[in-house]
Amino acid sequence: MTAATPAIEAEAERLLAALMHVECDPHGRKWNLDTCRSIAPLTLEINRLKKEKDAVILTHSYVEPEIVYGVGDFKGDSYYLSMAARDSRAKIIVFAGVVFMAETAKILSPDALVVVPDRGSGCSLADSITGDGVRKLKALHPDASVVCYINSTADVKAECDVCVTSGNVYDIVAGLPTRRVLFVPDRLMAENLRSELKRRGVDKEIISSDGTCMVHEEFSPAQIAEARAQFPGLKVVSHPECTPEVAAASDFVGSTGAMMKYVKTTPAPYFLMLTECGLVGRLEVESPEKNFIGGCRLCPYMKLNSLEKIRDALAAPRPDQIVTLDEDLRRRAARCIGKMFELTPAAKKD
Ligand code: SF4
């Protein structure tokens, strides 16, 4: 065991100030000074390497709390992190999230060395369709605008007209010039999109592929009914990757950023978060006065990230940790994301 030097002691206290609030820990850990001391040498080493190598670490809200609060320079959802990648001047970007997000960082920051802690960090949604699959759908529906959710590979983005996030999907699709829209890869988000456009009186035909998020598709209206019976006054918060039935039974449906904002600004005795557990961990740290009941789920891909793998990717990245893209494909994918930045209403850019 490493001796607790003053630097380790100070780092452990810094970590504890955030992590002491985390109850929804993926490993069931209780964060105290001892557990914080056990990771402090590693967070100190990573933070030193960041400075030496001119690196930034982007952390998705779904990765483990010691990564988000121990070494992350930016924390948030795909959209926020893609803007952070776009605006970054760092030589190295470490993306603690999943591979399609690191590809997005490389698309937007082509001169940076972009690395992923674990190459196996895929995504059930992003990996459900390839660029070739999109080309086949386009051949069947040549008159459709082609839209991809940001949870898609670079190969898919390169084939699409515009990219969207869960925060801007409704506004961007509503404003497209064609009536027919091909939407990939999320079938459930496409169903939620159809309902929302109908509610807004917008006439669009949405054709979707068949991907789903293995985390969000699992929530059910029965789970909501049971929780409401047990916790009067409960607010149910869900993501548009959930089924339309779950969305209809929720008090609020929105992107990760919008969900956080809703919880922080809504008075309620309890919240049920129908999303990945990492977001509950973040809310416990940032809104410790709120009460969350169990029910969130873990994404096995996000949980492949670890402090050790981040340290190794920073110190001496292996070839499989380095994200590379063909330049023509990268340019086409950058056009698709650039269109999203252009079409996102200012109010949705937070
Ligand atoms: S939570 Fe769902 S959408 Fe996000 S990375 Fe995991 S599988 Fe993909």
Image (cartoon, rainbow, N blue to C red):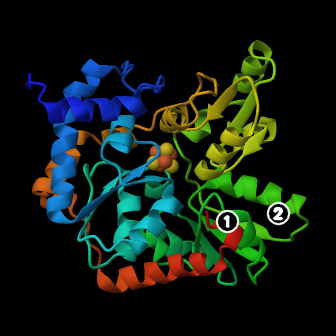
Side of 105 where 39 appears, left or right: left
**Residue 274 position (above or below residue 34):** below
The quarter of the displayed image where residue 205 is located: bottom right
Side of 287 where 325 appears, left or right: left
Res. 226 mark: none
Residue 17 is at least partly visible in this image: yes
Dot 2 or dot 1: first in sequence order is 2
Q: Residue at x 36, y 71 (%)?
A: 88
User: Looking at the image, is mark 2 or mark 1 nearer the viewer?
Assistant: 1
Q: Looking at the image, which is closer to me, 84 or 10?
A: 10
Near mark 2 (Cα within 10 A), the count class, few <14, some 14-19 or many ≥20, is some
Res. 348 mark: 1
Farthest residue, direction right? 201
Quarter that holds the C terminus: bottom right
Q: Residue at x 68, y 79 (%)?
A: 144
Expressed as whole percent of the image width and height from the top left, the position of residue 208 reads 65, 62
Residue type at mark 1 is Lys
For numbered disc 2, what is the local secondary structure? Answer: helix
**Residue 144 position (above or below residue 268):** below
Farthest residue, direction top? 230
Q: Residue at x 29, y 80 (%)?
A: 326
Res. 197 mark: 2
Expressed as whole percent of the image width and height from the top left, the position of residue 182 reads 65, 71
Expressed as whole percent of the image width and height from the top left, the position of residue 33 reads 29, 21
Expressed as whole percent of the image width and height from the top left, the position of residue 6 reads 15, 31
Side of 150 where 19 appears, left or right: left
Q: Looking at the image, which is closer to me, 145 or 277?
A: 277
**Residue 299 position (above or below residue 138):** above
Residue type at mark 2 is Leu
Alpha carbon of mark 2 to alpha carbon of mark 1: how far?
A: 17 Å
Q: Looking at the image, which is closer to me, 291 or 103?
A: 291
For numbered disc 1, what is the local secondary structure? Answer: helix
